[in-house]
Amino acid sequence: MPPVQRRIVISGPIVVKDLADQLGTKATELIKRLISLGVMVGVNHELDKETAVIVATEMGAEVEERASVEEREELLLQGEEDRPEDLRERPPVVTVMGHVDHGKTSLLDRIRSTRVTQSEAGGITQHIGASVIEWHGRPIVFLDTPGHEAFTAMRARGAQVTDIAVLVVAANDGVMPQTVEAINHAKAANVPIVVAINKIDLPDANPDRVRTELAEHGVIPDAWGGDVMMVPVSARTGEGIDQLLEAILLQADMMELKANPNRRASGTIIEAQLDRGRGPVATVLVNRGTLRVGDVFLSGSVYGRVRALINDRGERVKEVGPSMPVEVLGFNQLPEAGDDFVILEDERQAKSIADARANRSRQAQEGGNRGVSLDEFYQRLKDEAVRDLNLVIKADVHGSAEALAQSVVKLSNEEARVRVLHTGVGSVTESDVMLAQASGAIIIGFGVGIESKARQLAEREHVDIRQYRIIYEALDDVKQALSGLLSPKYQELFLGRAEVREVFRVPKVGAVGGCYVTEGKVLRSAQVRVIRDGAVVHTGAIASLKRFKDDVREVASGYECGIGLEKFNDIKVGDIFEVYTQEEVKASAS
């Protein structure tokens, strides 16, 4: 076959048929050439840009590579790189995290009330999801995110807004499950931690115990040769607040936080809500440049012109610089928290990019898959795209979680390593799913259930949750993922859940649960997992399913039924029956 004498332009992924048309050759010829290069494809397969360029060049065509629409957009939105001499110091952005009753809010309130500028004293602070305080003439920005869930939700959307995480731990309580969760979320995001040991005014306060417990979780105090500053404080009396602010600024100085204020602004949406009088309003954290009234902006697939800027003290301002939070009016519809916020030259440009993004996100949703599954990991490992298998482990008891975490980490090999981002006890929660989604992790549940909302979120975001009762089965799956062996396996299909409201003892049959189906449906032929206080106490088959006195094949959500289980009589009121089936999944041959 003579070489192709053509000059073609390739700007992104292209379908085999279209590339053949551009080259002026038959699709069969192109497919033959691709197969000789080791790429097995059909006529309607999409080739990535690199492969298309290689095969077209091989066939003798002169290829001009152009940036794709997305790449051109990205370059336009990024703007030019800042020169080092244009960078100026910027204030640190701090998120306060910690266990639920350890005093996050009261600590923030105390910092705010003692550190606001004099002009605001007696004024009403408008809540915009962030506040700026000044200490020794230096501003610090505190984000009022409700703990690590919001922190992770923003990371899941690619937004890295926080510079420093302040971890609040009560001196009388020590490290609690949510404290550990917060540590793991901060570590996964590579955000340095400053610890505030709160409530030191209480008689049973024991700051040293807190330091020891934190050290056990890899947060080593600087006094012990680690790199984490720990400051004893009392939100109630105000003791130690100065030292905490000093520690935050010291940490910020070490990070050398800088930005160029003399350019078009860009930032991140922290929160957005519909205001009755003012329409859609969003709080933006500017990360570089200066934002001014009248600027044309783009945020996700929403665009508009800045009508007004309102700072954290409720005052209207004309402009704001890097690291500053500000409320922006002028959106035509509500953006999402975590979206980027970029200033463009004109409205036409903003509208065309917003429309293109909206179309892409529609297409992505139709065929989209955001999470990563164990099967994809095998596949991507073959394609050498993945090097880390991230896991979130939840188990029924602490010992199992630790044992499983230690065992899976040992499975790491030269090709891929296992990283355990978080271990915890109890059911798989929404927070676990958000962490997994943000980090491309897989969740392993060991003898635990999955909360209803967590399951829905996992399905929506395509996060893979694997449930096991035997440690070897979990290790086996991970080992196979790491070695890229993909054997036919069974996939679990969740059908529904039922709650035991009463227990009946039936002669010759045993215990029967009088159940109410709260979600999905119950099938007579299905398997059932009995969950009590978040832990799995039994897995097995359904022996009988009745509506009133009749045997039935299935019962839908919202109805009552009697469920008897094979080889299990210890049914108790309050038990949750999770009903599922197993389907064999053929291994993908590619």
Image (cartoon, rainbow, N blue to C red):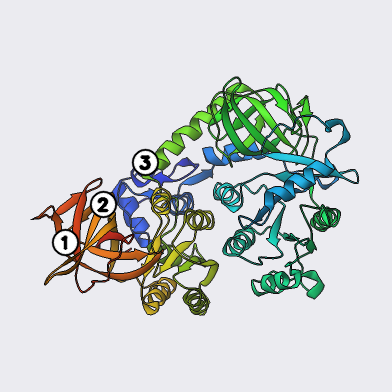
- Give the residue pinned by disc 2: 516
Q: Nearer the viewer, residue 12 or 340?
A: 340
- Give the residue pinned by disc 3: 366
- Is residue 124 in sight in this rendering? yes
Q: Is residue 450 left or right of residue 63?
A: left
Report how far apart the C-alphas of labels 3 and 1 lie in the structure.
32 Å
The kind of secondary structure element at disc 1 is: loop
x%, y% of residue 55? 43, 53
- Give the residue pinned by disc 1: 525
Can you tell which mark lies on residue 569? Answer: none
The kind of secondary structure element at disc 3 is: helix
- What number of labels is visible? 3
The kind of secondary structure element at disc 2 is: strand
Of tags 3 and 1, the one toward the viewer is 1
Say few, some or many: other residues with alpha carbon within 10 Å of mark 2 (under 14 / 14 to 19 / 20 or more).
many
Say few, some or many: other residues with alpha carbon within 10 Å of mark 3 (under 14 / 14 to 19 / 20 or more).
few
Label whose residue precedes the other's in the sequence (3 or 1)? 3
Under mark 2, the amino acid is Tyr
x%, y% of residue 51? 45, 54
x%, y% of residue 498? 28, 55
Report how far apart the C-alphas of labels 1 and 2 lie in the structure.
18 Å
Q: Seen from this angle, which residue lies furthest left?
A: 550
Label whose residue precedes the other's in the sequence (2 or 3)? 3
- For residue 40, which quarter of the picture? bottom left
Question: Residue at point 11% right, 72% down?
Answer: 508
Under mark 1, the amino acid is Ser
Label whose residue precedes the other's in the sequence (1 or 2)? 2
Q: Is residue 21 left or right of residue 488?
A: right
Classify 204 as above or below 109. Answer: below
